[in-house]
Image (cartoon, rainbow, N blue to C red):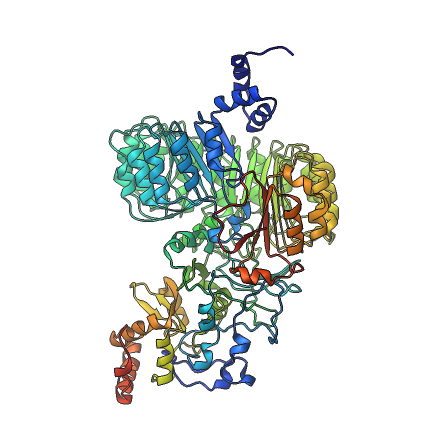
């Protein structure tokens, strides 16, 4: 065996971008483990309970960037009780003790408190970037701490968090000496923000590229900001309402006209159709457009705008765009890669929804489409087959037919064949969400063809245990499986338990899995934390009275080397 | 649910005990309404059907019989939670609070609160007390009256992030006039908190047409208290506080539905016409009866609105006449 000095190994390993590759390197031998360990700068923890924070910090002392994810994905849809867990505190504390050189922290679906943010702000002198996605538990006081103590902060990116509003002064906490901001996103804040402090901040940060405002920022303020920062690349507008033909409107058009670097637009809270016209000057440069929070814009105005966006790669809209609007998208946006169509009427009366026609049009116009999230009123097998043929490059395909278990309206058949066509054609499919009427057959197809599938979401589908078994047998790269309201039970769960150590997690709610089945699983697999979320049950006495035959409301298990967690609330029972 | 009674805004009118649920066993039908622990699918003996505790708006139902449930419930240590139904018709009340049976028989359930409570509740709930959290063993069975059947709602479906739902709800289209006949987004989400519960919920008031529907939905969401029911026009009927009623309130064994109006004042739900209520309601709070006494008292002493003056004045006098005012301690 040729001898490689460690420096050479390290040099080679530095070229490895992905965490998976690095992880593989570290398992080759002790020497390589050490090399990776000391040279790893960016650490990704997909499940905060899979490993203890202290272990991560000890293993990677030179870590500069840490990403941690907490709650299971279905927490987004309120299927996970509020205090289930996912606390950032132990992570921040461990990093503060062991990794003071940390520069970047990214948290998703975790509970972050103001104390955590203050500890973060005070513990890392080189801290540069904080990204919080779908987190909760903190307020603007925590943001004030970040602004105050993080000298040299480059990025503060708050995406869709629940932030308690304790006043507008947090923004003023950025000291006058703070000139390093590159990206600031506070779009999710519900309260007022000090607009003049913001304008001053923008004025003194020459490198500012991304700025996403919340709805409290008026157009007048936006004008001033754009005047100071015409070099913005990514803008989220604040509230976007102005009077017709007013001076403000003309200034706005001029301001946009000067933003030659602008590539990405979002926000548009309260946008009216008239205002949207102010954006026309820069449409031809846009690659990203998010209009999904602008319910007042109807299809005609949407298409007028989008009709100018030839270079668009990513588009998020509401379904009021309609099938006809999607035809316009298809004929204009030839470089489209990602499309998300959200329902504007959440309770689904179907009036303005899109159907399979819109999707087919998109697929024929946009062959580079690789990521789709599509909420629609109905879908047909024939449409899905056409889409599969037109767009073989899908890596993410999420289809949500608003009414559960809805069959193909033309043939009245389940949508097995349609989804089967998708998985057969899209060889690089990594993420799939299915909906509509589906039998076990679709899972047979998924198991057979979706070789690279990593995440699968299933709801109201399948006939029997066979469905789940097909998936577990077939999808070798499956990492996350989430199932709700399907007739899968213990037999499927226990068929191949060894598989679960190759996966990050599995969620099953409202299925046919029983307590006995979960216990059996936990007994066979000591390195899985099998959690039963049972909101009825708080006391241990009653746990003894439970029959193994009882069905379990919600089960979530994940592989871990950390053992059962010690912060689980009463209603979470780790078997 | 028991038949609606005439609305008494304080809710302290005498109510025939038979009208309270489970009448054949007498007014104190504690057995049938006793809350017990149980996993989904567990059969509680002696329970004919899963009696949902009626949540009715003040004032009806404040009789001793209506104590069913939550004094027992309060005893139960443990988390605030909602039970699932039996396995055959698995009705889930997750945080979403909606009803559904698996395999696609979405059942019209409590409402707009679905899907919105979660993240929003978090910050608030952090500060809330968890002691005395109510444990609910009663489950919601098929025999229950359906909430507005127009929209079948399933917990967590469609799979839209609660952030998006909340945002769209609180920033509805301001230019609805421009949008010809566009539906949806005429919604009015208000937070609903319950004393002792660790998290809040949200309901869309626009889904309901009257207090009865709202109460039925809230009942499903927080199914452990009884609040009086009001008439269709929301105007209280009977005057007068009965002594037993007052004592029940004082015992703190009852809950009262209140709301915060545009002026920031806390009002008893059920007084004003429904439309006026939805226009002015900013948030809802299910208060403990003992706390509500103070509210009632405040209410009596602060005359608001012309339509209240006359009634309050009358009531005020009535109470004085009955010599009962002195018995009400000011909390």
Q: Is B150 or A114 nearer to us in this picture?
A: A114
Is residue A59 shown above or below B245? above
| Image quadrant where one finds the N terminus of chain A | top right
Q: Quadrant of residue B64?
A: bottom left
Q: Quadrant of residue B43?
A: bottom right
Query: On the rendered structure, is B166 left or right of A24?
Result: left
- At x 44% / y 29%, what residue is drawn? A65
Query: On the rendered structure, is B2 left or right of B299?
Result: right
Query: Could you tell me residue A397's position as x and y percent?
Result: 62, 40
Q: Is residue B175 visible?
A: no
Query: Could you tell me residue B258's position as x and y percent?
Result: 37, 69
Query: On the rendered structure, is A68 left or right of A32?
Result: left
> Which residue is situated farthest in the bottom direction here?
B321
The tally of labels here is 0
- At x 26% / y 39%, what residue is drawn? A172
Is residue A190 shown above or below B71? above
Q: Is A548 or A435 nearer to us in this picture?
A: A548
Q: Is residue A356 visible?
A: yes
Query: On the rendered structure, is A114 left or right of A13?
Result: left
Query: Could you tell me residue A379's position as x and y percent?
Result: 66, 48
Query: Could you tell me residue B55's position as x and y percent?
Result: 47, 72
């Amino acid at each position: 065996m040729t001898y490689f000095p460690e420096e050479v190994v390290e040099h080679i390993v530095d070229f490895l971008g992905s965490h998976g590759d690095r992880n593989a390197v570290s398992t080759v031998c002790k020497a390589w483990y050490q090399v990776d360990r000391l040279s790893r700068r960016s650490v990704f923890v997909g499940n905060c309970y899979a490993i203890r924070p202290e272990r991560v910090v000890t293993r990677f002392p030179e870590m500069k960037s840490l990403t941690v994810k907490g709650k299971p994905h279905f927490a987004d849809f309120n299927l996970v009780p509020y205090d289930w867990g996912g606390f950032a505190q132990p992570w921040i504390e461990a990093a503060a003790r062991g990794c003071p050189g940390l520069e970047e922290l990214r948290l998703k679906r975790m509970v972050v408190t103001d104390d955590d943010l203050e500890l973060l702000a005070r513990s890392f002198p080189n801290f540069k970037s904080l990204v919080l996605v779908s987190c909760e538990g903190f307020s603007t006081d925590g943001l004030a701490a970040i602004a105050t103590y993080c000298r040299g902060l480059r990025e503060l990116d708050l995406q869709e968090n629940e932030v308690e509003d304790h006043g507008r002064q947090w923004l003023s906490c950025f000291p006058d000496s703070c000139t390093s901001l590159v990206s600031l996103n506070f779009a999710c804040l519900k309260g007022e923000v000090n607009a003049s402090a913001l304008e001053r901040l923008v004025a003194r940060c020459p490198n500012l590229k991304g700025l996403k405002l919340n709805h409290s920022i008026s157009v007048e303020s936006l004008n001033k900001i754009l005047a100071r920062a015409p070099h913005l690349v990514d803008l989220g507008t604040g509230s976007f309402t102005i009077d017709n033909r007013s001076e403000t409107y003309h200034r706005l058009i001029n301001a946009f006209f000067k933003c030659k670097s602008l590539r990405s637009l979002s926000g548009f809270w309260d946008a009216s159709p008239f205002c949207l016209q102010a954006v026309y000057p820069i449409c031809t440069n846009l690659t990203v457009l998010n209009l999904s929070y602008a319910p007042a814009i109807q299809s005609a105005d949407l298409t007028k705008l989008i009709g100018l966006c030839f270079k668009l790669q990513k588009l998020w809209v509401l379904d009021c765009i309609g099938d006809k609007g999607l035809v316009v998208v298809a004929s204009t946006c030839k470089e489209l890669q990602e499309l998300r169509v959200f329902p504007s009427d959440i309770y689904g009366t179907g009036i303005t929804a899109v159907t399979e026609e819109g999707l087919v049009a998109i697929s024929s116009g946009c062959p580079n489409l690789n990521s789709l999230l599509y909420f629609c009123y109905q879908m047909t097998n024939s449409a899905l087959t056409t889409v599969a043929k037109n767009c073989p490059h899908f890596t993410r395909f999420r289809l949500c037919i608003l009414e559960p278990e809805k069959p193909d309206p033309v043939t009245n058949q389940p949508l097995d064949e349609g989804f089967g066509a998708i998985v057969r054609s899209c060889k690089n499919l990594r993420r799939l969400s299915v909906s509509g009427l589906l039998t076990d057959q679709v899972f047979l197809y998924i198991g057979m063809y979706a070789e690279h599938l990593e995440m699968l979401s299933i709801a109201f589908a399948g006939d029997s245990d066979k469905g789940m078994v097909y998936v577990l047998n077939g999808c070798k790269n499956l990492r996350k499986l989430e199932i709700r309201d399907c007739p899968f039970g213990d037999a499927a769960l226990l068929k191949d338990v060894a598989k679960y150590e190759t996966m990050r997690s599995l969620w099953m709610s409202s299925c046919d899995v029983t307590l006995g089945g979960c216990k059996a699983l936990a007994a066979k697999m000591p390195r899985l934390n099998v959690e039963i979320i049972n909101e009825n049950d708080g006391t241990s006495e009653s746990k003894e009275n439970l029959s193994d035959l009882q069905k379990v409301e919600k089960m979530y298990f994940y592989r871990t080397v950390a053992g059962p967690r010690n912060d689980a609330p009463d209603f979470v029972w780790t078997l | 649910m028991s038949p609606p009674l005439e609305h008494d805004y304080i809710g302290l009118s005498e109510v025939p005990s038979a009208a309270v649920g489970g009448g054949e066993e007498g007014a104190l039908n504690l057995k049938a309404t006793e809350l017990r622990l149980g996993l989904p699918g567990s059969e509680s003996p002696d329970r004919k059907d899963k009696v949902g505790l009626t949540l009715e708006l003040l004032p009806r139902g404040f009789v001793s019989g209506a104590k069913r449930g939550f004094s027992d419930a309060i005893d139960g240590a443990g988390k605030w939670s909602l039970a699932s139904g039996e396995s055959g018709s698995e009705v889930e009340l997750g945080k979403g609070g909606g009803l559904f049976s698996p395999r696609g028989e979405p059942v019209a359930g409590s409402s707009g609160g679905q899907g919105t409570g979660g993240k929003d509740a978090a910050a608030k709930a952090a500060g809330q007390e968890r002691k005395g959290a109510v444990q609910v063993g009663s489950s919601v069975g098929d025999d229950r009256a359906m909430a507005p059947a127009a929209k079948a709602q399933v917990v967590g479906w469609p799979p839209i992030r609660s952030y998006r739902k909340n945002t769209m709800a609180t920033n509805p289209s301001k230019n609805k006039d421009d949008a010809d006949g566009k539906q949806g987004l005429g919604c009015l989400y208000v937070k609903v908190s319950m004393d002792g519960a660790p998290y809040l919920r949200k309901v869309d008031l626009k889904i309901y047409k009257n207090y009865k529907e709202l109460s039925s939905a809230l009942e499903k969401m927080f199914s452990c208290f009884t609040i009086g029911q009001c008439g269709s026009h929301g105007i209280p009927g009977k005057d007068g506080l009965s002594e037993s009623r007052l004592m029940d309130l004082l015992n703190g064994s009852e809950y009262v539905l209140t709301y915060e109006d545009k002026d920031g004042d806390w009002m008893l739900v059920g007084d004003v016409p429904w439309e006026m209520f939805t226009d002015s309601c900013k948030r809802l709070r299910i208060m403990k009866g003992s706390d509500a006494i103070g509210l009632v008292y405040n209410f009596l002493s602060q005359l608001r609105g012309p339509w209240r003056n006359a009634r309050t004045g009358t009531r005020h006098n009535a109470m004085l006449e009955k010599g009962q005012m002195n018995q009400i301690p000011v909390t």
